[in-house]
Image (cartoon, rainbow, N blue to C red):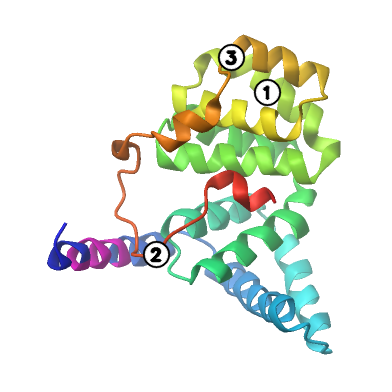
Amino acid sequence: MTENTDFDEFAEYKRQSAEQRQKINNEVYDKILESAKFFLKKRQTNLVSDEIITALDRMEDASKTPNLNDITDIYLFESEFGLNPRDLTEEFLYITLIMISNHYEDKQMQYIENIILSDSKFRGSNALQFYLKIGTSHKEKREYILSFIENNIDQFPDGHKNMVAMFIKTFLQGDKRAKVIFDKLNISNPEFHFKNKPTTTHNKPKPLKTYPKWWEFWK
């Protein structure tokens, strides 16, 4: 791939990012982003500051948005189209997961489920990743999530099935219900499938930066 091709792809990615940014709740996005900047700086420098109160207040305000499905759209936007540096993107996604998705009720979970079932490519994979992370981070939602997976696993494309297998193998080896799902999937080495994932799955141009594998966000 030539340098000009790389530049053209990144320019197209930026164009798509700007276009998609218009579809999300930007007021809430900016609140989360400002908090993420603070928490990242705190993590990197052990910063002690009264600004933590402001950062937490911003996150509380974001969690009170009238339509919490906006949070899912923001999370998926940042996963797929965000232009922030990798470490800031990770912090953004992490605090959204930890501080806001715990407020999700059935309506918000069903919104994610509809994306998972209707999109077999990148957006659907991101939605499934978010869904599984909610189950990891908020144990009270785990049975709900396992029920959805168990009831719908036959409809999942191979990429979704591999992700579920990786999730169970990494985090739920001692869970009997998860083991039943894993055995049904019959994927003994899900890591192999991710290492050899076809490039056609990522049908959106990506910026010239390297992201960790999706399961590394859980570590």
Q: Which residue is mark 3?
A: 185
So how many labels did they put on this image?
Answer: 3
Q: Residue at x 29, y 54 (%)?
A: 205
Judge whether 199 appears above or below 157 on screen.
Answer: below
Distance from label 2 to label 3 (Cα)? 33 Å
Q: Position of residue 16 (x, y in %)?
A: 31, 60
Disc on the earlier residue, 2 or 1: 1
Q: Amino acid at mark 2?
A: Lys
Q: Position of residue 185 (x, y in %)?
A: 58, 14
Judge whether 218 appears above or below 33 on screen.
Answer: above
Q: Amino acid at mark 3?
A: Leu
> Quarter-wise, where is residue 147 in the image?
top right
Q: Nearer the viewer, residue 113 or 5?
A: 5
Marking on residue 209: 2
Marking on residue 148: 1
Q: Are marks 1 and 3 in contact (CB under 8 Å)?
A: no
Q: Nearer the viewer, residue 28 or 178?
A: 178
Disc on the earlier residue, 2 or 3: 3
Q: Position of residue 190 (x, y in %)?
A: 54, 27
Q: Is residue 55 left or right of residue 125?
A: right
Q: Residue at x 30, y 61 (%)?
A: 13
Q: Amino acid at mark 1?
A: Phe
Q: Which residues are magenta?
A: 7-14
Q: Nearer the viewer, residue 37 or 212?
A: 212
Q: Residue at x 36, y 63 (%)?
A: 17
Dominant SS of magenta comes to: helix
